[in-house]
């Protein structure tokens, strides 16, 4: 990958010390009372108390948030494992949705180990030098490309095994490109055009494509509903927005398509709550997401085409021309949506999810 500075993870001891020293935390007696209450209420270790920042002053309604392991069980219950491969494998995802004219990033090339597929052609690349030559040809034949994205077909969760290769680095750093080859030929990767983010979203954070995570549910009648959404940003120079690598998430008001007031990261990267981006200075509250109605329409249409997967988290980017569907996740971590939405126990759509889960799991 391009070199980026990743935030350091806190040890558990350091995290608890940070919470203890936090001037915005609740009094210790209140915290202990709430932790004890959640232990009995959820019948599990109350990790949710820390992962959802419930130790902060002003964080009431602590029963609204659902523990992550319970969310995972519900997601798994509603999704057929055999069908999930269509989403989890990025090549299958691309080939499947492309036939329905769903707007996707353009795939330039892909490989299965040493065999590479470019359009209708296939060829074998046995060494890094030949791989480098092919990539240089791609850039030379596409002068508008400043960079390309190279991502593993399967298992690149959390932004791992995703490369952003710039034209300049391709030209100047042959050893780096040849090192990418050694990784690529171990399995399969997609080579895609880099998304050019909408200029308004750039005002929020220009160093990466800020993707929206939005989840949908197909109810028992076949109707698709959007449950909630949040946008992901980074606060350094990384081209990855992923919150599993220190990025922040900000909730989205579904009806208005605007951001909520606060941004949060995983506590293991620190417990600082943001109201604006520390580099651009852009205030979160009220920031309007371009094409948000089209974003909702896009994920609803994608969900309709995947009826065996009833509960899915979709990743969407916003280009100048409109939203682009990056990927779908049948094993998505709904804990982020639960948190940024204010707790799924009071989300009207997710209440229907839980009601059906309880009915069907007992039958």
Image: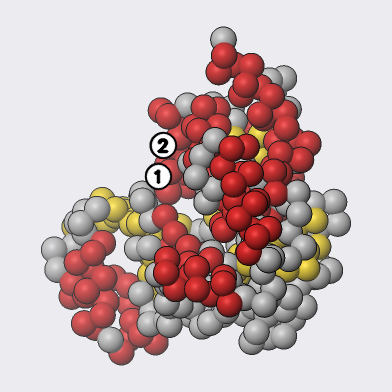
| Residue 273 figure quarter | bottom right
Residue 128 % position (x, y) = 18, 72
The residue located at (73%, 66%) in the rendering is 57
The residue located at (72%, 78%) in the rendering is 276
Q: Nearer the viewer, residue 71 or 32?
A: 32
User: Is 307 left, or right, of 110 in this rendering?
Assistant: right
Report the residue marked by disc 1. 89
- Do the numbered discs 2 and 1 sit on residues whose CB atoms are within 8 Å? yes
The residue located at (71%, 44%) in the rendering is 64
Report the residue marked by disc 2. 85
User: Is 231 left, or right, of 270 in this rendering?
Assistant: right
Gap in Å between the C-alphas at discs 2 and 1? Answer: 6 Å
Residue 222 % position (x, y) = 69, 23
Q: Is residue 49 above or below residue 245?
A: above
| Residue 123 figure quarter | bottom left
Q: Considering the numbered disc 1 on the image, is that residue within a helix, a strand or a loop? A: loop
């Amino acid at each position: 990958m391009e070199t980026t500075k990743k935030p350091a993870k806190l040890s558990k001891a350091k995290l608890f010390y940070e919470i203890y020293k936090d001037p915005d935390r609740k009094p210790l007696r209140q915290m202990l009372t709430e932790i004890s209450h959640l232990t009995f209420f959820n019948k599990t270790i109350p990790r949710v108390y820390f992962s959802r920042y419930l130790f902060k002053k002003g964080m009431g309604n602590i029963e609204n948030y659902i523990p992550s392991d319970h969310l995972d069980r519900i997601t798994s219950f509603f999704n057929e494992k055999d069908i999930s491969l269509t989403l989890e494998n990025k090549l299958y995802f691309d080939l499947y949705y492309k036939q329905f004219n769903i707007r996707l990033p353009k795939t330039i090339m892909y490989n299965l180990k040493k065999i590479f597929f470019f359009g209708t052609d296939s060829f074998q690349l046995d060494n890094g030098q030949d791989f480098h030559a092919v990539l240089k040809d791609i850039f030379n034949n596409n002068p508008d490309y400043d960079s390309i994205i190279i991502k593993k077909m399967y298992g690149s969760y959390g932004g791992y095994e995703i490369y952003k290769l710039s034209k300049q680095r391709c030209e100047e750093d042959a050893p780096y490109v040849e090192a990418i080859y050694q990784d690529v030929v171990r399995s399969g990767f997609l080579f895609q055009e880099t998304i050019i983010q909408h200029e308004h979203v750039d005002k929020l954070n220009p160093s990466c494509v800020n993707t929206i995570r939005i989840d949908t549910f197909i109810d028992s009648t076949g109707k698709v509903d959007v449950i909630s959404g949040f946008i992901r940003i980074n606060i350094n120079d990384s081209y990855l927005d992923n919150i599993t690598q220190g990025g922040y998430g900000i909730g989205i008001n579904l009806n208005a398509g605007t951001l909520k007031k606060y941004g949060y990261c995983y506590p293991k990267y620190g417990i600082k709550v943001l109201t604006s981006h520390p580099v651009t200075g852009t205030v979160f509250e009220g920031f309007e997401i371009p094409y948000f109605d089209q974003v909702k329409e896009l994920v609803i249409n994608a969900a309709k085409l995947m009826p065996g997967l009833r509960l899915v988290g979709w990743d969407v980017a916003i280009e100048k021309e409109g939203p682009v569907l990056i990927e779908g996740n049948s094993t998505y971590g709904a804990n982020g949506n639960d948190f940024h939405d204010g707790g799924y126990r009071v989300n009207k759509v997710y209440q229907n999810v839980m009601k059906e889960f309880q009915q069907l799991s007992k039958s």
